[in-house]
Image (cartoon, helix red, strand yellow):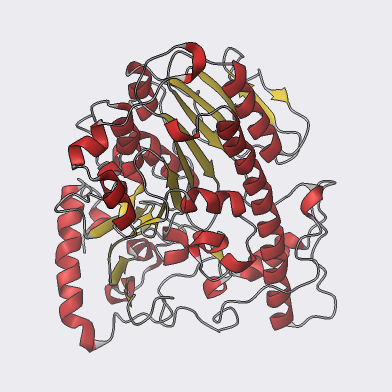
Amino acid sequence: MKRRRFLQVAGASVGSVLLGSRISVEASGGTDCRPNILFIMSDDHASQAIGCYRLRLSAHARTPHIDRIAAEGAILRNCFCTNSICVPSRASILTGQYSHINGAKTLAGRLDPRADNVAKHLQAAGYETAIIGKWHLRDQPAGFDYYNVLHGQGRYHNPILYETGADWQQGGKVHQGHSTDVITDLALDWLRGGRDRGKPFVLMCHFKAVHEPFYSHDRYRHLYADRDLPEPEDLRWPESPRGKRFEGWPLEILAQRFQKNPNQYAPPKLDVTGLDAEGIRRATYQKLMKDYLRAVAGIDDNVGRLLAWLDETGQAEDTVVIYTADQGYFLGEHNLFDKRFMLEESLRMPFLVRYPREIAPGTSLDEIVLNIDFAELFLDYAGAAVPADMQGRSFRANLAGHTPSHWRDAMYYHYWTHQKERPSHYGIRTDRYKLIYYYGLIRLGREPQAYWELYDLQTDPREQTNQYDNPQYSATIADLKRRLRHLRTEYNDTADPLLAS
C-alpha cells in the first residue's frame, strides 16, 4: 500500500490518528469534531468501467471526478458484495448484515421501517441524516431526517420522487430532467439550505444510473460515436467459463431488448439487418458499452458538482467522501450482462474514499472489505457504538495505514434467488481461490457433483476455466470446503436444508 508518505508526515500512533482529527461544523459556530459523510452510490457501476481501476475498459471510461476521489484518498482493490443484486445489497449496506439476517434476500425483499439500520444510529449520535435518489427498499425510509427518493427503479427522465412529509404512496412529485442531474440538484439544495448547520451531516446520494436500460442525457450521445470499444477475449467463445455450471443471461437476450421500439428518451434501437449470429452479438456489445459509458459520464459530471460544492464551501477537508456502487456488473465478459453471480465482474464493488485528515492521497487497500462493513465504517467516523447484531467490521484503521491483526482472509457470498438461468448459490473467495456451490441446481435435477465451480485467480484471473474436476486441486478443494462450512456457521447461515454440501 502507498502509505509511506502518510506515515512519515503523520508520525502518529493508531490512537492519535483515529482520535486526534478535529473539525468544526461550517461557519455557523458549531463545535462538533466529527466529519461529515457524503456517501455517493450508483447502480450497477462496474469497477472495470472506472478510470482509476485500470481494468479492461478503464482507459475508455470518462470518470475524472470519480478518479479524483481515489487520487486524493484511497482505492479499495478487493471490495465485494455479499449478494450481488440491488435490494439485498442496499439492505446489507444499511444494516451491516447478511441477507438472511436482515430479511432482504431477493429483489422482492424489503427493509422494515421498524427494523434497525445505520441511519437510526447516526441520527441518535447527533448527525443530520438524508437520503436522496434511489431507495429501492419498498417501505418508507426510516432513520433519515430528510428523504426525497424514487419508488422502485424509478425512471431516467422526468423522475417522480417522494419527499419527507408527503404521502408515501400518492405524494410523488415529477421533476423535469434526467434523473442523475435531478438527484444531484436535490442533494445540493439540501446541502445548501435544507439542514441543521449546527450538526455534522450524513448525505446518501444514490443515482439510478447506470442501471439497464442505460439511458443518458442527450448531451452525452456523441461520446464514443467514432470508435469501437475493445471486446473481452471470451465474448465470442461458445462457453465461458469452460465447464461452467450456471447459464446466465447472454448478450442475445439484451439484443432482443435493444431491438424493441424505444421511447422518446431512449438511444436509437439496435439495427441487426444483415447480421449473422456473431455479428449480432458484437453489435449488441458495442451498443451496451456505448450506452453504458455515456450514462457513466453523466454520473461523473454530477460527482464533480458535489465535490465542487465541498471545495467552494471549505468543507472538503472535513468530509468523508465515498463513491461506490451496489454491486458489480458483467459488461460482455463471459458473453454476459447483468450481475447476481459470484464471478469477479459481478462480485466486485468499486469503492473510493477521501478524507484528507486521515487518508493519505494515493492509498491502495488490498484487504478484503465487504458491503456489510460500510455501516460500521460510518459509525466509526461518527464516534458511535456498533450494534452487536451487525456482522461487519469498520475498516477505518485500514484506510489510515493500520490494518488490524486477524483481518479476514476470505469472504462468504450467498445469492438466494432460484431461477433456471441464474441458480441460487453460495461460496468462498480467498486471495487466490474461489469455490462456488450452485445448490439451486438441485431443483433442476442435476447430479450433486455438477454443482461446484473452482477458480484459481492466480493462474486464471478472468475465471475462464472451472478447475473443480482437475485432480491437481483436490486438496485445495477439501480445504476450501472446510473453510466454507466454518464461514456459514460464523454468519449463522445454516438453516436452509438445500444448503447442505
Write down the quadrant of residue 29 in the picture: top left
Count of labels in the image: 0
88 vs 203: above or below: below
Residue 254: where, in percent of width, then height? 66, 64
Write down the quadrant of residue 77 in the picture: bottom left
Q: Is residue 362 left or right of residue 68?
A: left
Q: Residue at x 61, y 54 (%)?
A: 64
**In this view of the protein, can residue 337 be seen by the observer?**
no
Q: Is residue 488 left or right of residue 270?
A: left
Residue 327: where, in percent of width, then height? 47, 52
295 vs 199: above or below: below
Q: Nearer the viewer, residue 414 or 343?
A: 343
Q: Quadrant of the N terminus?
A: bottom left
Q: Is residue 214 left or right of residue 478?
A: right
Q: Residue at x 67, y 64 (%)?
A: 289
**In this view of the protein, can residue 289 be seen by the observer?**
yes
444 vs 21: above or below: below
Q: Residue at x 80, y 66 (%)?
A: 225
Q: Residue at x 28, y 72 (%)?
A: 432
Write down the quadrant of residue 133 in the picture: top right
Residue 222: where, in percent of width, then height? 81, 59
Q: Nearer the viewer, residue 25 or 263?
A: 25
Q: Quadrant of the C terminus?
A: bottom left
